[in-house]
Image (spheres, rainbow, N blue to C red):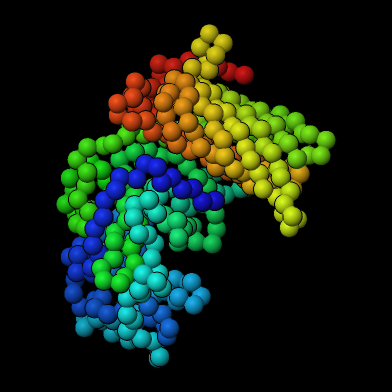
Amino acid sequence: MKFIITSFAIIATATLSRSIHEAQAALPPGYEDQIYCPPDNCEIYTNPFGYAGALSSFYKCYNPSTGKTTDGVWTGSLTNVTAPEGWIEPEQCTAEEYSQCNTDADCSIESSYIGGREVGNNIVTINGSCECYASSYYHPFNPCGDDECPMCGPACEDMVATCIVGTGDTGGTCTLTYADSSDDDDISEAPTPAPTNKKIDCRSDYYVQFFDDVVYTYSDDGLTVKTWSPIYDDFDKKVVVGEYSSVDTIIPTSKGEYTCQQSSFVGTQIESGWYANQVNAFGICSSTGPKNVWEGDAAVSGGLGRYKDSTGMLRWQCSSKSCDIVVETCVPVNSSVSVQPYDEEDDDDVSYATM
């Protein structure tokens, strides 16, 4: 599933050259002196996590004809590695051949459980860590390879997805920078100085919806699906923190396929019979036919409580037993509401409803 938010990008550009990143390399000279790629490949630079490290972690082989990215073979004066027969010393790809971005608006911050999800004995568990990374509109990054990563809701508000503009006729690269970091070893700060002041306050809230709690209502043709369910803040299913509801409209197309439109609601923390924190979202969902809706990506505009004056995205994605719901919102610093990152210690002072 692909999540893109371009509204919150802080515009900053920088030039890209291998010399900048060689200075940050983890291996000394003699171990990774030259990359070799298969014929018809060129060389690209990619760094979605904003890491520093060995050159082989970031410089890859790319085939413009197939669109495939592969690892190269690195040789060095201090190693016995030799390039496979017929492999070449690649030129850098031109922007026409490969470019992740032209401006920051082409990049987005995403978050996933890297390590994925395991399903066994009817129990869904997460066996990876929740990580933030930058993705490109033109070349989306999937940290789980060919598998689909379960989404998650870490606090990414200190991070900014930026476009490192290529030099000459080379393309740009999306990477993470840290808005308030002063760490000189951060690879993102070498090409892109970090902003000194945040433009927005952001938060990310993560909820879980279990299918055995969901109440469904279908239209006669199955093309309108209404759902309601309690939501939890983890997979232990101990405390209900609020409710999720949606209306999904499945629309057949002339090609025999389907599009889907959605209206979603999330409410948490009941006070005097009302949910103190409420947010509505409108956007798209995915469906293969009547009664079948499994993921959505909707825009947030305003709300109540901690979502007042906010904009952002409400995203959800379902597996065989449950759905992950992530609400990522931001408010301007001059808003009447100060949005604070989620802190588990805050739960000690909040009484949630149990349904």
Q: Is residue 354 above or below residue 228?
A: above
Which residue occupies 38% across, 81% down?
Answer: 37
Q: Is residue 178 above or below residue 98?
A: above
Q: Is residue 95 left or right of 317 when viewed as pictured?
A: left
Q: Which of 245 and 121 is in front in this view?
A: 245
Q: In this view, does 244 lie above or below 293?
A: above
Residue 75 placement (x, y as % from top left): 28, 81
Residue 298 placement (x, y as % from top left): 54, 39
Residue 162 placement (x, y as % from top left): 32, 52
Q: In which quarter of the image is residue 74?
A: bottom left
Q: Can residue 183 be seen in this view?
A: yes
Q: Can residue 124 be seen in this view?
A: no
Q: Quadrant of residue 50?
A: bottom left
Task: State the quadrant of the C terminus.
Answer: top right
Which residue occupies 29% across, 48% down?
Answer: 11
Which residue occupies 20% across, 62% down?
Answer: 24
Residue 320 placement (x, y as % from top left): 66, 45
Which residue occupies 41% across, 80% down?
Answer: 41
